[in-house]
Amino acid sequence: MKVAIFGAGTMGRGIAQVFAANGHTALMYASSIASAQRHKEQLDASLQKRVAKGKMSQGTKDALMANVLVEEESAAADADLVIECIAEEMGPKKELFHRLDELCKPETVFASNTSSLSITEMGNGLKHPLIGMHFFNPVPSMKLIEVIRGVNTPQETFDFVYKLAQDIGKEPVEVAEGPGFVVNKLLIPMINDAIGLVESGTASVEDIDKAMRLGANHPMGPLALGDFIGLDICLAIMNTLYDETGDSKYRPALLLKKMVRGGKLGQKLRVVGRIVPVGSRVARREDPRRAVQGVHLQTGVVGEHRHKAPQRLPCRRTRRPGLDAGVALEAVGVLGRI
């Protein structure tokens, strides 16, 4: 099967890797051919490191990369599936799909990796069927895919994508359209509330995370998780929830908006078969089935206050209920020093 993936960042590279590893042709698209080629080279380099460490054979790596192609947009005309994972903004997503609507063969299925936006609105005016296919980060190791029906999503499109998710080794869940779907509608407001607790002075960043790790058995505190996801992403989802529902419980915390306006976005991570926190020394595993989620307390912190002498935290790897068996946590950190 030929899959055209538009957006070659963290999610796009991960999606391309998963499809290529399962024998499908994955076309990678970015803002330009040169940019897409650089992302492909990054993926190749990360997999080569796995080969060097004995985590993957050279033959397996070469076969996978042979399935990852960078071509002109016109090559997507005969794609069986198009997946978009560009910026979480309705306008650019609709513009992309309307352009591809004129290019792709009638049988092509359109899918969006949106984390919160309306599939129905995104698909309005398209001749091709549209469905939500929401992967989770890091794509190679996280098993879940939310399969989201829009109002006009045909049953055969849903059946095709649901089975395809299973065929590539994922666990799909059926979701009717609603802002934030399932995971983010539950998860992101919790992060927002945790930021609100910091803002009100109810508890410190460290103690909020500690309370949820030890009291609710969460593998990572909500503020550390917000740091990991990126505060800009959290704010975008909260805005969608609030705009769509009008419910004040989804109003973004003022501190969250302030941090994003100031460019304090959190521990931005790159995933190319692994997770590497920017500026830190955690996360050394290359095997996407054993990706390491790492966040440092003292590096890349968000906020105004920073410790003068960063400390090297003792690294502890934990396995927690509900966390994918292939994912470990190292040196769980916090959203930031606020």
Image (cartoon, rainbow, N blue to C red):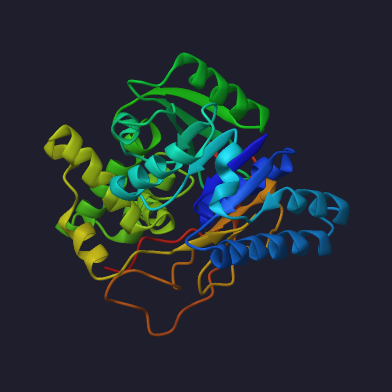
In the image, residue 225 lies at what x, y percent? 41, 52
Q: Can residue 324 be seen in this view?
A: no
Q: Can residue 166 be seen in this view?
A: yes
> Who is closer to the viewer here, 314 or 24?
24
> Who is closer to the viewer here, 97 or 10?
97
Query: Farthest top residue?
Result: 155
325 horizontally vs 125: left or right? right
Q: In which quarter of the image is residue 189?
A: top left
In the image, residue 157 lies at what x, y percent? 50, 21
228 horizontally vs 60: left or right? left
226 horizontally vs 12: left or right? left
Position of the N terminus, as image quadrant, is: top right
In the image, residue 55 lies at what x, y percent? 80, 54
In the image, residue 111 lies at what x, y percent? 47, 35
Position of the C terminus, as image quadrant, is: bottom left
178 horizontally vs 8: left or right? left
**Above or below for 308 versus 192:** below
**Above or below for 204 versus 93:** below
> Who is closer to the viewer here, 113 or 26?
26
> Who is closer to the viewer here, 97 or 39?
97
Residue in the image at 38% along x and 57% along y: 230
Residue in the image at 12% along x and 39% along y: 248
Residue in the image at 36% along x and 25% along y: 150
